[in-house]
Image (cartoon, grey):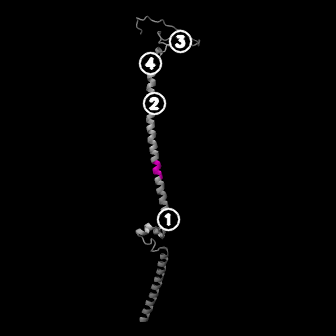
Amino acid sequence: MSKDKEEVLDEELEELEQEVGEHREAIEAINQYVDEDDMGELSFKSVLGGDILGSKFFLKQILFVVFCVVLMLLYTANRYSSQQDAILIDELRTKLQDVKYNVMTQSSELMNFTRQSNIEKLLRQTNDSTLHNPTTPPYLIKTDGENPEPVIIEEEPEEEGEPTV
């Protein structure tokens, strides 16, 4: 029986050695892809000296780092552009308000100049004009449906003492 047990134990030992050998091959394959010294020696001196830029980890991540730098540049450019637009908008609002005030001033001056009393004053000051206030009431013009020429109906001016209704 001891020979049978020894044979069984030898067979199990051989099987275990085969499994260990397979596991060693797997571990070696993994170690090829994963280097324990991937970051190198990480110290303040290596970061400032630029040694970290040559490490395998950094070389694997170089595209991500470039992508992050590009995003930072775009973010900064966008912020600068939006600030310039905000400054321009404020300047244009100020100019618009000034123009509105000028238009209001000019329209009020025009309204003041075009009042009937101011026009009459100007006409009185210049003797060149033949314009004056009418003393007779306006005429009523009636047209016949058959005759297209207007017919002017003159009203007699009323005496100055009688009020008109």
Q: Is residue 162 magenta?
A: no
Report crowding for label 1: few under 14, some 14 to 19, many 20 or more residues within 10 A (C-alpha): few
Q: Position of residue 87 (x, y in %)?
A: 44, 44
Distance between mark 2 and mark 1 Cα atoms: 61 Å
Report crowding for label 3: few under 14, some 14 to 19, many 20 or more residues within 10 A (C-alpha): few
Residue drawn where x is 47% and y is 51% of the image: 78
In the displayed structure, 24 sits above or below 76; it is below
Amino acid bearing label 1: Ile
Amino acid bearing label 3: Lys
Distance between mark 1 and mark 3 Cα atoms: 96 Å
- Going from N to C along the chain, the mark reached first, 4 or 3, is 4
Q: Position of residue 83 (x, y in %)?
A: 45, 47
Read off the residue under disc 3.
142
Amino acid bearing label 2: Val
Q: Is residue 1 visible?
A: no
- Going from N to C along the chain, the mark reached first, 4 or 2, is 2
Give the secondary structure at mark 3.
strand
- Going from N to C along the chain, the mark reached first, 3 or 2, is 2
Read off the residue under disc 2.
103
Task: Quadrant for the C terminus, please.
Answer: top left
- Going from N to C along the chain, the mark reached first, 1 or 4, is 1
Give the secondary structure at mark 1.
helix
Give the secondary structure at mark 2.
helix
Return the mark for residue 162: none
Return the mark for residue 62: 1
Q: Position of residue 159 (x, y in %)?
A: 43, 4
Q: Which residues are magenta?
A: 77-82
Mark 1 or 3, closer to the camera: 1
Q: Position of residue 71 (x, y in %)?
A: 48, 57
